[in-house]
């Protein structure tokens, strides 16, 4: 069965066809043989019967002659014998040469009613009453024939040996009784003598079966081949396709199912090849993206990491992982557009490629961060390469009319001192980079172990801060804003103060950045907002309802999605009038999407709040923001005020800023004013509102001891997701 199932289709089809042809031939042969045999048998029977009729007529005639005395009884009997079976030969049997044809082996027998063969070619005068059929041994054939004849005559069948051959054949007899003679006349012969020609039909049929089978096999095999050959081609095509070779199969000039199958296969193969090509391209692209950066066309962090680890494994003596981080790149992006931003990124990479040596590798390891691997060079060479890089980059940007000044933070870690594999080296470089970013200067920072302490300190600090917020260790101090013209307080700025039970007094310059680095900015922002809203009535009691209280909002809190809802919630909770408050934001908020900032500012202003741009001039100052955002006040940073007594250019710049803010209708506040000289100069360039130690230091507001508002822990916890 297994062999049959595994047999080629063509062979199986051929076997089916052969079986069908043979079955058809056999069926036709059997039917034709049966029909013709029956017809021939009938003919034989007629011959026998006619023979008996003729013999009877002769015998009747002879009886008349005998009665008339023309023959004696014995003469008459001998005449009958000669007439029916011929002359007696010397071998002792009749020669059967008579006028009545009973076929090749046919002869006459005449029995008397006791079964004695009166006439018989070989057994004359023998009593055959007890002769039985050699096959059916209970069949007394002579008795049966006599009985049939006595009953009016008829046919009988029995088996008998052929006279000269060693085989038995079927015999048929016709027997009739002649009352005058009291004889039974029997004509007998082998059925074969009549239906021999029917057998030739079988021969013919066998020959035609062989012939037709041959023709059938050839025809069928041609037909089957015409199906299986294209199928074989398709199978080969499929096998090649599974090996990745999508070739076309030679089409055949046929439009039947097989022809269409080939066309279909070719179309499918073509489609798969196309899809495969597409997939291949995508896979190549994915593989490319897995190791490369699209914008800068540089290797990415994965490839960089592999390369560094490989080089280390090769056994190099020393190496550096240098990181450069484009300063305020988000702001660059939002001012000049991301297309120019991308262009800058590309040129940063290309410029470094132009100056690096062969063994060095540069990669873009994250958004605005590039990492470079140097090996076997001196530390001083690093600075030379950085300077060369800056030169090349500036030239390129100038050549491409990009006016933007691009600065970088630099940090590096040294192999093997700071790590013996990429991950450790990169981690340490990143720590040094964190440092570089906090210091906002252009120094190249080398990783130091103490930097790790700072990070650990940050962690400790954030834990203490969390405690401080929930345990109200953080309080608010208010610093006055005074009008030079009237010398009256026209507003105050709320400033956070932290007296930690563990650390003692901690300056906002330390804990505010720590909050912004931790995930506490939102909780802290909400806390300060509610604290100031709660205390405002005491402040307003002290200075009058007309003054505005300024609240500092960190950029992280300001760009937070929930910021507006937190403000609205606090407004309702403390029933404050937003027109009595100012939100101070710094230019750092503009690292976020300008449209979002505009929207938030717009919502706050609709509610009634005023907006102040704090520390103007320290961040990424762009006069664009002054024009684009609907603010109310600009606060000039202390660093400018510090310089005005010694630097005329700063004075000129402050005068210009005053003009611009005047033109836009913004208030301007000078921060950190400490001396009368500064005040005098500020007065000359049109500044009226002053905030600084000259007039007052930040101080807590005095109010009766009543319990402070509870921070809503639930909402804080929910918000504390950053
Ligand atoms: P800022 O908003 O620019 O606040 C003014 C800072 O200058 C305050 O420092 C104030 O004490 C200081 N200052 C004012 N006049 C003088 C002066 O004449 N001489 C000197 N040397 N300093 C003067 P402070 O309170 O240490 O706060 C530092 C910064 O911390 C603030 O700068 C503000 O950016 C941030 N900060 C303070 N409280 C909060 C707050 O509640 N939330 C947020 N997000 N930031 C806050
Ligand atoms: Mg401020
Ligand atoms: Mg300020």
Image (cartoon, helix red, strand yellow):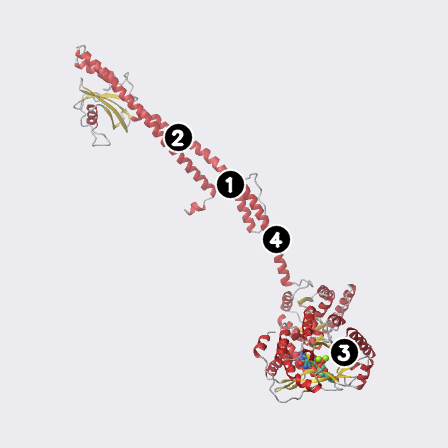
Task: Answer with mark 2 or mark 3, whichever residue precedes in sequence.
Answer: 2
Q: Nearer the viewer, mark 1 or mark 3?
A: 3
Residue 227, disc: 1
x and y percent of residue 326 in the render? 71, 70
Q: Secondary structure at mark 4?
A: helix
| Residue carrying label 4 | 277
Looking at the rendering, the quadrant in which ligand 1 lies is bottom right
| Residue carrying label 3 | 668
Q: Disc 2 versus disc 3: distance between alpha carbons?
A: 123 Å
User: 651 above or below 91?
Assistant: below
Q: Disc 2 versus disc 1: distance between alpha carbons?
A: 31 Å
Q: 60 or 626: which is nearer to us?
A: 626
Q: Nearer the viewer, mark 3 or mark 4?
A: 3
Task: Answer with mark 1 or mark 4, whichever residue precedes in sequence.
Answer: 1
Q: 586 or 551: which is nearer to us?
A: 551
Q: Secondary structure at mark 1?
A: helix
Number of numbered labels in the structure image = 4
User: From this viewpoint, is residue 703 visible?
Assistant: yes
- To which quarter of the image does residue 255 belong? top right
Q: Answer yes or no: do the residues labelled 4 and 2 have beta carbons within 8 Å?
A: no
Task: Answer with mark 1 or mark 3, whichever residue precedes in sequence.
Answer: 1
């Amino acid at each position: 069965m297994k062999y049959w199932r595994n047999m080629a289709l063509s062979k199986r089809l051929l076997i089916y066809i052969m079986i069908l042809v043979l079955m058809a031939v056999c069926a036709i042969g059997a039917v034709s043989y049966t029909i013709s045999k029956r017809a021939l048998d009938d003919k034989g029977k007629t011959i026998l019967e006619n023979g008996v009729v003729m013999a009877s007529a002769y015998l009747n005639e002879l009886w008349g002659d005998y009665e008339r005395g023309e023959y004696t009884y014995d003469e008459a009997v001998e005449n009958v014998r000669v007439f029916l079976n011929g002359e007696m030969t010397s071998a002792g049997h009749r020669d059967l040469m008579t006028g009545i044809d009973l076929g090749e082996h046919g002869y006459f027998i005449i029995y008397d009613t006791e079964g004695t063969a009166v006439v018989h070619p070989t057994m004359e005068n023998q009593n055959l009453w007890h002769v039985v059929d050699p096959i059916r041994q209970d069949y007394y054939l002579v008795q049966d024939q006599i009985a049939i004849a006595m009953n009016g005559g008829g046919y009988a069948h029995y088996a008998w040996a052929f006279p000269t051959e060693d085989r038995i054949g079927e015999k048929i007899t016709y027997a009739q009784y002649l009352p005058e003679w009291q004889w039974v006349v029997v004509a007998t012969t082998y059925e074969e003598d009549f239906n021999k020609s029917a057998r030739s039909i079988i021969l013919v049929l066998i020959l035609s079966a062989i012939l037709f089978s041959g023709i059938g096999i050839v025809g069928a095999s041609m037909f089957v081949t015409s199906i299986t050959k294209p199928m074989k081609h398709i199978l080969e095509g499929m096998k090649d396709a599974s090996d990745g070779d999508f070739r076309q199969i030679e089409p055949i000039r046929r439009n039947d199912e097989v022809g269409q199958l080939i066309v279909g296969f070719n179309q499918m193969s073509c489609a798969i090849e196309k899809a495969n090509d597409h997939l291949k391209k995508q896979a190549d692209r994915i593989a490319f993206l897995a190791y490369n950066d699209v914008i800068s066309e540089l290797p990415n962090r994965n490839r960089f990491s592999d390369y560094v680890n490989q080089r280390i494994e090769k056994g190099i003596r020393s190496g550096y992982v240098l990181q450069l981080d484009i300063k305020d790149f988000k702001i660059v992006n939002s001012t000049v557009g991301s297309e120019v931003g991308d262009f800058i990124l590309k040129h940063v990479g290309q410029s470094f490629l132009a100056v690096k040596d062969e063994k060095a590798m540069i990669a873009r390891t994250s958004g605005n961060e590039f990492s470079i691997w140097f090996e076997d060079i001196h530390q001083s060479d690093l600075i030379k390469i950085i300077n060369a890089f800056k030169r090349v980059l500036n030239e390129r940007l100038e050549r491409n009319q990009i006016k933007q000044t691009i600065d970088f933070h630099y940090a590096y870690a040294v192999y093997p001192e700071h790590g013996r594999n990429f991950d450790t080296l990169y981690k340490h470089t990143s720590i040094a980079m964190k440092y570089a970013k906090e210091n906002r200067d252009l120094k190249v920072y080398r990783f130091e172990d103490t930097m790790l302490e700072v990070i650990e300190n940050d962690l400790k600090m954030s834990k203490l801060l969390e405690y401080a917020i929930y345990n109200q260790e953080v309080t608010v101090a208010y610093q006055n804003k005074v009008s030079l013209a009237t010398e009256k307080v026209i507003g105050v700025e709320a400033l956070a103060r932290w007296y930690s039970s563990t650390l003692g007094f901690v300056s906002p310059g330390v804990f505010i950045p720590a909050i912004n680095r931790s995930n506490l900015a939102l909780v802290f922002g909400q806390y300060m907002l509610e604290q100031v809203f709660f205390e405002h009535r005491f402040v307003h009691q002290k200075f009058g309802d007309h003054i505005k209280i300024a609240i500092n909002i960190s950029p992280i809190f300001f760009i937070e999605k929930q910021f507006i809802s937190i403000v609205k919630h606090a407004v309702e909770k403390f029933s404050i009038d937003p027109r009595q408050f100012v939100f101070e934001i710094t230019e750092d908020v503009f690292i976020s999407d300008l449209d979002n900032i505009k929207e938030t500012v717009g919502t706050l202003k609709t509610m009634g709040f005023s907006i102040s741009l704090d520390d103007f001039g320290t961040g990424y100052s762009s006069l664009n923001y002054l024009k684009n955002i609907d603010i109310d006040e600009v606060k000039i940073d202390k660093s400018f005020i510090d310089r005005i007594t010694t630097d005329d250019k700063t004075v000129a710049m402050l005068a210009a800023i005053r003009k611009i803010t005047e033109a836009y209708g913004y208030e301007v506040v000078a921060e950190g004013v400490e001396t009368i000289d500064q005040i005098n100069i500020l007065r000359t360039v049109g500044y009226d509102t002053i905030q600084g130690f000259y007039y007052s230091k930040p101080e807590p507001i005095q109010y009766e001891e009543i319990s402070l508002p509870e921070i809503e822990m639930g909402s804080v916890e929910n918000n504390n997701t950053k």
